[in-house]
Image (tube, rainbow, N blue to C red):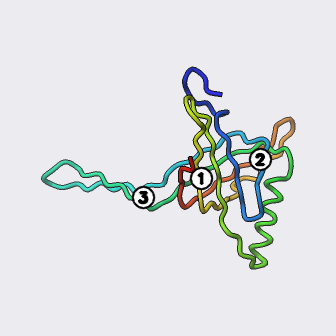
Amino acid sequence: MPQSGLNVGSDYRFDILTSAGPLVLPTLLNFKKRKITNKVTVKPLNALPIILSFQEGGWEGSFEVSRADGTLDNYFAIFEANYYAGINQPAGFIQETVTEIAGPPSTYQLQGVVLYFDDAGEAEAEKNVIQKVSFLASTRIKLN
């Protein structure tokens, strides 16, 4: 729920749908996303700089999970096995739902999502295992 008129992390819900079905992450710790933009500065000799922005890069992001089960390990093991077996693996999507401070929730969808298992976790006594996943997406659209 929002606090003091501001959104906080618990106002967000992320649903990940892969070619193998939903990827349910019960211990999602954080989620980062960023628009990839090609920024170009033209520097004329006789005028102020001209700033250009090209929307050609899609989106990128990452999230961390405190390992509570084999969800990520199993997903990426299947993904790897399918890759070596020559099985086509279509991209998925991530749906982001935000509880807005005033008004109905907003829903966005990252499309053409490919996940990367950046860090399967470090096992150390008396510490939880943190797994890290990054992603690339073709686009992000507003659903409502």
Query: Residue 84 placed where, x, y %?
Result: 77, 76
Please name the amino acid that badge 1 sits on: Gln
Q: Residue at x 56, y 54 (%)?
A: 60
Q: Quadrant of residue 52?
A: bottom left
Disc 1 and disc 3 in contact, CB within 8 angstroms: no
The first of marks 2 and 1 along the sequence is 2
Query: Residue 31 placed where, x, y %?
Result: 64, 43
Between 18 and 128, which is closer to the camera in this rendering? 18
Q: Residue at x 69, y 55 (%)?
A: 118
Q: Residue furthest bottom?
A: 86
Disc 2 and disc 1 in contact, CB within 8 angstroms: no
Q: Secondary structure at mark 1?
A: strand
Q: CA distance from mark 1 to mark 3?
A: 17 Å
Please name the amino acid that badge 2 sits on: Leu
Q: Nearer the viewer, mark 2 or mark 1?
A: 1
The first of marks 2 and 3 along the sequence is 2
Q: Which residue is mark 1?
A: 109
Query: Residue 39 placed where, x, y %?
Result: 37, 54
Q: Which residue is mark 3?
A: 55
Q: Which residue is mark 2?
A: 25
Disc 2 and disc 3 in contact, CB within 8 angstroms: no
- Tell me the number on the disc at residue 32: none
Q: Is residue 111 left or right of residue 88?
A: left
